[in-house]
Image: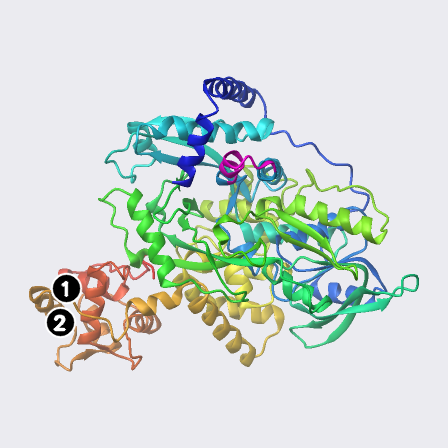
Amino acid sequence: MAFRKAVKGTVLIGGGAIATVFGLSQFSQYRNKHGTLYVEAAEPVPVPMKNHFPTREEQLLTLQSTSEFDVLVIGGGATGCGCALDAATRGLKTALLERDDFSSGTSSRSTKLIHGGVRYLQKAIMKLDFEQYKMVKEALRERANLLEIAPHLSAPLPIMLPVYKWWQLPYYWIGIKLYDLVAGNQCLKSSYVLSKSRALEFFPMLRKEKLVGAIVYYDGQHNDARMNLAIALTAARYGAATANYTEVLRLLKSTDPRSGRARVCGARCRDVLTGQEFDVKAKCVINATGPFTDSVRKMDDQEVPNICQPSAGVHIVMPGYYSPDNMGLLDPATSDGRVIFFLPWEKMTIAGTTDSPTDVTSHPIPTEEDVNFILSEVRNYLNCDVEVRRGDVLAAWSGIRPLVTDPNSKDTQSICRNHIVTVSDSGLVTIAGGKWTTYRAMAQDTIDTAIQTHGLKAGSSRTVGLQLEGAQDWSPTLYIRLVQDYGLESEVAQHLASTYGDKAFEVAKIAQVTGKRWPIVGKRLVSEFPYIEAEVVYGVKEYARTAVDMVSRRTRLAFLNVQAAEEALPRIVDIMGKELHWNEQRKKEELEAAKKFLYYEMGYKVKSDQLTDRSEITLVPSDIERYKKRFHMFDKEKKGFITIVDVQRVLESISVQLDENTLHDILNEVDLNKNGQVELNEFLQLMSAIQKGRVSGSRLAVLMKTAEENLGQRVVIPVDRSGGGL
């Protein structure tokens, strides 16, 4: 509704404006057919780039042995790492401290879009807000730069805006064309209109009834956690002393001899992994902690008022068949006025996001209410032939946006993501607000302010056009060399190239031989995803120090399928344990911590909530009898429950062999009271949940049905996860 009103407002400008938009759009289209994105490179970087980035231990030693840095950045998200890179490439002696892992917070939990913000443009037009316009203009410029400096991690993505009323077509078209025009010579590709038939051809699962047509525009998409890490690694290569799992306990202050005032001069830190404490001194300290901005500001001054109001955004991941491989969907006006994106990502489908006030926490949890809201909105736009099942939610997460607001404001949906840079009386520089896309511009503004207020000697920013880790020698066909030179599967090679860029060869070199004819190297962590064991070894080199780091940020398994992530955990822990010299107790602790992370923060708890020992059985009598018959085929003694032995006996009768660990995992998915057996009531609860769409992809259900249908015949029964989710 808000978007429609906004575009209506543009029409009121008159026919002349429409003609101008049309004329300029044709010029823009001509330009984009005959040219490429224009990103003006900055001045050369005055410091050399290291061939290898230091180890974490070497970085900690540098932090402890350096008498004084020019800049100390607190926070290892996109903005903090961007500040470290900007400062280091200007020749400033730079340090960065992150309490958790790089990108462990908001920066890894985004919608994965690199965008200017269509809805911010409508606010600029409706309210004649020049600041909003400048923000969109800046974001579109930064979008082009990000696609240029990390092409292996990002790419343009067409996004469809379906139209269900004839009068909406010209309104939406004008709004989207304005978006193209504001981008200027950095427009990715010109937007276009599709007829109903063409829209359904591109997006066959779209709801057909009353569909008039669609408008397609372009924004960027990226792998957010890997992008954040690439910024951090690039900063390290340019000499920044960056350390994750290093917590700031308090700010250090000294008295300025000229003014007599207390000035922030560093921070007291603690290595979270060892407990060792030490001081890091710096001429300027920068607070780039996102949602935790105010907590660091209060280390400086307890009386300072809050400048951030956190907002929670929940996303869900569904199987890839819910969306085309290369076309996203925008719902511009949901039932409560919010915007929902429906996007392909890593061969899955992301849907989100919500927007609601929240408390600041290091461990945000997605709620069932938010998940169901997103599913409800998705159902409104998909064909009725596509059953949108609750059980198809493979992962869910919540991210906290650090929105800049008046402390008295309560409506986070009306808050702009403009960033602000403030300097306290004691010299603490704080960067707050903003959005993922504009991290580089935010960092530039922050370092400019730091130089000005602290008298640092440095030139202008060098980060425009500065390629990030892995981009230097990357090309779209790089994966072919990986297949040819190392014998990797094509899917695995494509994944490595799009994750590590030209550093993919370093991963391939340490990949283990499979012992098979093909692939020659590259043992997968789980069968249905292209992540291989060598990535765990390489991830340790990239500063991964916990199993959670590996399963969620070095790989993205936790964000794609939490069950697959849990399955991969034991092997990940074993490999990391060998690399980091963990004892058995530490390995056990890592496994439990990672499972807890998946359970609460990545939506695994939702699975338990969908099927519990209190779940209602809503089957009709005929279905109950049918499922009892199937159950008793395994429970020959009529005990009322089945065990691994019962399942093995039936499978052996049809010449199918499964190892005991696999059978244990299969039964454990349905063993609700965790007593080592599946009772009849639990089986009926499972089948009832499947019928209602709350559970899908149950291996036990598929196995028992297949065994029943093929009893007496030699068959192969699939026991891999079918893609069903939470």
Q: Which residue range is magenta in the image? A: 120-130
Predominant SS along the magenta part: helix
- 222 versus 687 height, above or below: above
Residue at the far front: name it. 408
Q: Disc 1 and disc 2: Cα gap in Å? A: 8 Å
- Mark 2 falls on what kind of element? helix
Quickly name the residue at label 1: 708
Quadrant that contains the C terminus: bottom left
State the scheme by which the image is colored: rainbow
Q: Residue furthest right?
A: 258
Numbered tag placed on residue 543 in the rendering: none
CB contact under 8 Å: marks 1 and 2: yes
Name the residue nearer the viewer: 141 or 725. Answer: 141
Residue 652 visible in the picture = no
Mark 1: amino acid: Glu
Q: Quadrant of residue 615?
A: bottom left
Label 2 Cα neighbours within 10 Å, binned few <14 / some 14-19 / many ≥20? some
Q: Is residue 281 left or right of residue 615?
A: right
Query: Is disc 1 placed on a helix, strand or loop?
Result: helix
Quadrant in the picture for residue 718: bottom left
Question: Is residue 347 something that shows in the picture?
Answer: yes
Amino acid type shown at disc 2 = Met
Nearer the observer, 147 or 646:
147
Residue 412 appears left or right of 277: left
Which residue is identified by label 2? 633
Labels 1 and 2: the sequence-earlier one: 2
